[in-house]
Image (spheres, helix red, strand yellow):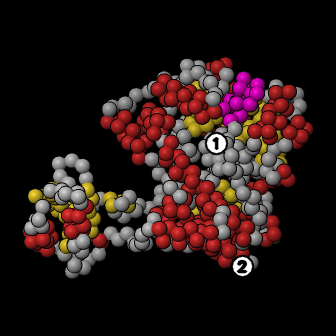
Amino acid sequence: MEEILEILEKDGRITPEEIAKMLKKKPEEVKAAIKKYEKEGVILKYKAVINKDLVKSEDSSVRALIEVSIIPQKDAGFDKLAERIYSFPEVSSCYLISGTYDLLVIVEGRNIHTVSSFVAEKLSCLENVRRTTTHFLLKKYKEDGVILKQKEENKRIAISY
Amino acid sequence: MQNIISKKVERIQPSGIRAFFDLVLGMKEVISLGVGEPDFVTPWAIREAGIYSLEQGLTSYTSNKGLYKLRLGLSRYLKTKYNLDYSPDDEILITVGVSEGVDLALRTIINPQDKIIIPQPSYVSYGPVTELAGGIPIYIDTTKDNFKLTPEKLEKVIDKRTRGIILNYPTNPTGVSYRYKELEALNKIILKHKLICFSDEVYGDLTYDFNHVSFPTLPGAKRNTVYLNGFSKTFAMTGWRVGFACGPKEIIAGMTKIHQYTIMCVPITSQMAAAEALVSGKKSVEEMKREYRRRREFVVEELNQAGLTCNKPDGAFYAFPSIKKTGLSSLEFSQNLLKEEKVAVVPGTAFGSCGEGYLRISYASSMDNLKEALRRIKKFLDKS
């Protein structure tokens, strides 16, 4: 992977000037490269990774992984129905996968009821959806490469040869 | 109390900057760029192998030389990496870090009053360990030659009592390393005077701009070289304490003799983890290396911008900037920086008196820490 992307993937807030120093490039070069990535859709967006378990608020959300079996359609295969499913704002991720079912849909809702009613009233009723199996997430340990446990203090001794 | 301690040990000077170290260790919320070990944790697959070996009940001694599996792995590793041939049977010894390797090698070779050449600034243990082995360290100041030992200066100090030379490249504390041609020139002198070369290449895998040249690969060098390396820096395994020494079988046999009476063997858990590092560690090493390289560029650029002249280090994770223009001594600079800005660095004098006027700055620290520390260093310089 391009090194600029590797750096940004770790820290989206790092400045082009800092990246330029790290890679021994001109800031303008880095800025241009980033702009190009953004334009091409290689870089889609920048966002904070939030540990929602620590956010005590009314609308703390629940998540469910839903296995969806569907009947592929002539000409469009799985894509058309997938689009109908992922267009719902409740759906945060949607993947076509191999194995015993077809789509893995990740749904977020305010509580268990909102998620269940989404499945019962929206998802299952779609034409060509054969079956759904819903798994509620109980605990998050690691997400997108980030371990959600509070970081332990650095245990290295402060000075050594 | 004085009479109790042997004259040999009495003669060894405690480090002159011990008090400064204590100051650092006693202070809270310091950003430390004084650390001589990776900031990465040992890659999980390696840690897991150590844990698994414990679950399997592997808690006994191993052979003195170390697990055959590990020696075999190393033999293959060195063959693939440098096309070096060391037999796992009698040319490789597993040691407790490179520290033990250096000690064993020197004790095996040195007769009383033999001289050992040490280019300085150098890692702190070479001189004292030479003295403890009964030898006399002969230091060569390399500061005027961009911290590199030159063949001329080397040849100048050699006399009849000179037995060997300790090379360490990439060098702690300067980050300097040598190219093939430079090593070849040094090797010619070493061969001419029949010296033993103790080559500490523990930072060899952290060489950024060119391929590391292992000393025993030079023409004719293998039979008088003790090649010393370890897992600490490459695989972020400092606390496991695993190193290895490779060399002619007579020397390895001598070293094994001391090792078996003093250490017995390296802890088996550590050896099992090290064996795994050779199998699955490569990808993590590449990632860490890319990260160090980016930090190197950043730190060197920032230091030079701040007015502290600094060569770009070839390897390891240290920058060695000059602070001469501030008019402060290395120790004064470090103490003031610590007190005023809570940033810890190591005064250059820790690595020999010729390190006066320099600092060792370790970039084995997160980018966030480096950014903040350099901001503070700039602030400190603006004030003074």
Give the residue pinned by disc 1.
B204
Q: Nearer the viewer, residue A160 or B6?
A: A160
Q: Earlier in the sequence, mark 2 or mark 1?
A: 1
Is residue A79 left or right of B77 when viewed as pictured? left
Q: Nearer the viewer, mark 2 or mark 1?
A: 1
Which stretch is magenta? B214-227
Q: Amino acid at mark 2?
A: Asp
- Where is residue B288? Give x, y as percent: 53, 52
The answer to which image quadrant residue B57 occupies is: top left
Place of residue A149 in the rendered image (x, y in percent of width and height, measured from the top left): 34, 62
Q: Is residue B224 in the magenta section?
A: yes
Q: Which residue is mark 2?
A: B382
Q: Nearer the viewer, residue A64 or A72?
A: A72
Secondary structure under tag 1 reads loop
Residue flagged by tag 1: what amino acid is it? Gly
Magenta region includes residue B246: no
- Residue B174 higher or lower than A22, as above or below: above
Q: Is residue B171 above or below residue B39?
A: above
Residue B84 in view of the camera: yes
Q: Tag 2's secondary structure?
A: helix
Q: Nearer the viewer, residue B83 or B72?
A: B83
Give the side of residue B214 with respect to residue B234, left or right. right
Q: Residue at x 23, y 58 (%)?
A: A75
Q: Quadrant of residue A45?
A: bottom left
Q: Quadrant of the C terminus of chain B?
A: bottom right
Q: Is residue B10 visible?
A: no
The circle on residue B141 is none
- Image height check: is A140 above or below B288? below
Locate the N terminus of chain B by quadrant.
Answer: top right
Name the residue furthest front. A75
- Of all chains, the one bearing label 1 is B
Who's the residue at 86% across and 27% down the image?
A: B192
